[in-house]
Image (spheres, grey):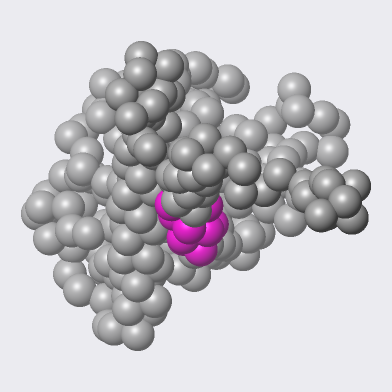
Amino acid sequence: MYRFLLTPRWLGFAALIGVAAVVMVLLGNWQLHRYQQRSATNERIDESSRVAPVALPEEVPAAWTRVTVTGEYDPANEILVRGRTVEGAVGYEVVTPLVRTDGPTVLVDRGWVPPSPSGAASMPKVPAPPKGEVTVVGRVHPSESRPDSVSLRDGKIEVRRIGVERLAEDLPYPLWGAYLLAEEPTAGFTAVTIRHENSWQNAGYVLQWWLFAGLALAGFGWMVYREAHPKADEPVDRAEVAIA
């Protein structure tokens, strides 16, 4: 009854459905991995908000760890990060080096400022950092991917993305391996919000891909059944029934 499955046509069709189902299962597994990664990140964000900050270690800890570090701000090498959005407004994040006496300099994201009322071509108003020795509490943020080239505008470094290694090439001192998001921005700044990653979107994709794989196999099984039982769903000829 099912010998037709050994024909080239059905063998090719079965191989196609099998490959498609395997690919969809693998895509679901990849989305499951992304869900687990993002869930772990969200857990670290929540956990770090409940624990006291630790002294800045030599090695970069996990992202979003709360740390405390002491040093003096260096406004001469301040960095403007353009194209940053807060509540629908596009402005700048201001990253200021915090020079330490007991280790490499740490880049501190002091917060967000709006663009100049004169337009994007004009320099924004950036509040000066506190003078003298300060202690900063912040969250560890790894370098952003795909750092762009560094440009100078009115004596200030300007970038689109924060890449610590890239910025170290243009600064006069070694840098710590990540940067910090200051928890309490000074007057004139808006705090940079730490947002949870959308892990549930990945969970939805997991179910979607696995469901597609199941439907592909079920559909193939139904086609095989129809081929093996061609008369199972044929309509009954009422004229023949009446004659009988």
- Residue 3 lies, in percent from the top left, at 33, 30
Visible in this render: residue 46?
A: yes
| Magenta-span inclusion, residue 207 | yes
- Seen at 31% across and 65% down, the residue is 40
Query: Which residue is outermost to the front?
Result: 244
In the displayed structure, does residue 42 sit left or right of residue 98? right
Q: Residue at x 47, y 39 (%)?
A: 228
Name the quadrant containing residue 32: bottom left
Front-most of 44 and 158? 44
Give me the residue at 89% from left, 55% from top.
Answer: 242
Is 6 in front, or is 75? Answer: 6
Report whether 153 appears left or right of 174: right
Classify residue 23 by image quadrant.
top left
Looking at the picture, how far across and down is residue 22, in whole percent?
33, 38
Give the residue drawn at x 32%, y 49%: 29
- On the rendered image, what quadrant is the N terminus found in? top left
Magenta: main secondary structure = helix
**181 versus 45 height, above or below:** above
Q: Position of residue 178 (x, y in %)?
A: 27, 46
Q: Is residue 45 above or below residue 29?
A: below
Q: Nearer the viewer, residue 38 or 28?
A: 28
> x and y percent of residue 229 in the render?
53, 43
158 shown above or below 53: above
Residue 33 belongs to the span the image colors magenta = no
- Residue range in magenta is 197-210
Left/right placement of residue 55 relative to residue 142 reads left
Query: Which of the 4 quarters of the picture holds residue 221?
Result: top left
Q: How many marks?
A: 0
Q: Eyeballing the image, is 237 above or below 242?
A: above
Visible residue check, residue 171: no
Placement of the C terminus among the 4 image quadrants: bottom right
